[in-house]
Image: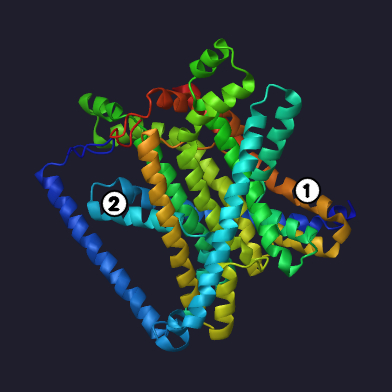
Amino acid sequence: MSQSTVLYDTPGPRARRTYRIIGVVAVLALLVLGFVVINILYENGQLEYEGVWEPFVTPAYLELLWGGLLDTLKAAALAILGALAFGVLFGIGKLSEHRLIRWPCWLVVEFFRAVPLLILIIFIWSLYSLQLDRSFHALVIGLVLYNGSVLAEVFRAGINAVPKGQAEAAYALGMRKYQVMTAILMPQAVKIMLPSIISQCIVALKDTSLGYVILAPGLTKVGREIWREFGNYLATALVLLVIYLVINLILDLIGRWVERRYTGGRRLDVGAPGALGEQDAVAQVEAARKAATKGGAGTGAGGFQ
Amino acid sequence: MDALTENWDLILDGFLNTLQLLLGAGALALVVGTLIALFRVSPVPVLRGTGAVYVTIFRNSPLLVLLLITYYGLPQLGINPSFYWKIILAMGLYTGAFVAESLRSGINGIPLGQAEASRSLGFTFGQSMTQVVLPQAFRNVVPPLASVFIALTKNTSLAMSFGVAEAAFRMKGLVNDYATERWTIFIGIALGYIIIVEAISLGAALLERRWRAER
């Protein structure tokens, strides 16, 4: 395996020795850091069982956490399903030949992508008169609008990434616009879009934590209840972090696998909202089209394009 | 429109706080992100591993939970900076992971042949870095970095749940006080955010166009 990159050449014996020394020093530094952290935790009584970690081995609280996790997963799943529908609708809308359809779709997508999700959620909740039993709806609707707009961009880019000849050939065979979309473009685009859709699932899952602000059912609300009772803020927050991390890492692994399997390691990313995005999109589509034409065969091609 | 016109000073103040958070967290994220990116492209396996672990953890954690840790957790360890710094810390560390990824992909996007060509022309390491590699890397990095800062702008709204009186906090207050004007208030505050987002986007687009012309 050659180690040469744009930054440095394949190391010789002296460089290898230097690298090894730096490596040892880094390991030592990490060990010291770990020790200091554990020491600080210990000195401040954060490693004790009673009142700190106790709830996380007590069945009643574990059940509470489990319920919170289910609520969170439910919110994320509903959000993604809704966002997919929203994304298909507006993504295709943005590709429409009719200005009257294209423009409103563009406006909606750009708006929801540029507005912070939190103010969207709070606003929707306020439309429900800030009722507690409606906070879950507000959270899910907010997530659908935001993630749906991002997915709309993903759909548009995915459809555009299918080589032009495919659609032209289909039209030449006498297919209608609807048939070209559903029979030719969509099936090929889905393959290209899958990794982006999965990474959007991670984003949606992370954003369910915003339910905390409007007291929507979910992990963060359960966490609040636990530390209200025990005062173990740090331990509770760390437990929440680990739960979120485990789920997201599993999703991440699936995403990477799909990426390798279907797109030859190329991820279709969506440009920024606004002027940059518009300018970017052109280059993006060109690159994606090139990658797609290669048929996604370059599985072992490594990180470079 | 009353809700917006009567409270324009509150709203403006809110957006100034938003910008302050953006600058503080953005600066920290650039520092942390550059460091982690250097780790990730270094020839030392341990450092590469450390960088990869950092990025994986912070990219996959919800920012809100990180804020809970710095805001409520750190004081329990006897570490208690002012609340502005606690929020900046969480946002900076979180955004740093995304900055690191942008920088790394910028460097990795340069064809190996560029570096090989400059070495075979007899450029020293410093020359090949400053004349060949980094100028191209900067260009590659502008669009993803702008996306990161746009996301950060939107993420600063999370500070409202910890009592920072930035724009989202003002919106929540106004929505409570002027129940009949919710739509106006929402659109107004949303436009404020859109202006910031568009400014970043436009700036990056101009920068990119200018640098692209040099090629």
Q: Find the residue positioned furthest to the top.
A: A172
Query: Where is residue A42 shown, x and y percent of the image?
Result: 37, 83
> Could you tell me residue A44's position as x and y percent?
42, 84
Q: Earlier in the sequence, mark 2 or mark 1?
A: 2
Residue B84 location, quadrant: bottom right
Whether residue A195 is visible here, answered yes or no, is: yes
Give the residue pinned by disc 1: B187
Q: Vertically, is A103 above or below A66?
A: above
At numbered mark 2, what does the secondary structure look like: helix, strand or loop?
helix
Residue A165 is marked as: none
Relative to A103, A50 lies left or right: left
In-front residue for pair A187/A197: A187
Distance from label 2 to label 1 (Cα)? 45 Å
Q: Label 2 amino acid? A: Arg
Q: Chain under label 1? A: B
Residue B34 shows up from this direction = no
Q: Residue at x 23, y 52 (%)?
A: B45
- Which quarter of the figure is the N terminus of chain A placed in? top left
Q: Label 1 crowding class (10 Å Cα cut-off): few <14, some 14-19, many 20+?
A: some
Q: Amino acid at mark 1?
A: Ile
Closest to the observer: B208 or A74?
A: A74
Neighbourhood count class around disc 2 (C-alpha, 10 Å): few under 14, some 14–19, many 20 upward: some
Which residue extends farthest left?
A13
Callout 2: chain: B
Q: Which residue is mark 2?
A: B48
* Element marked by disc 1: helix
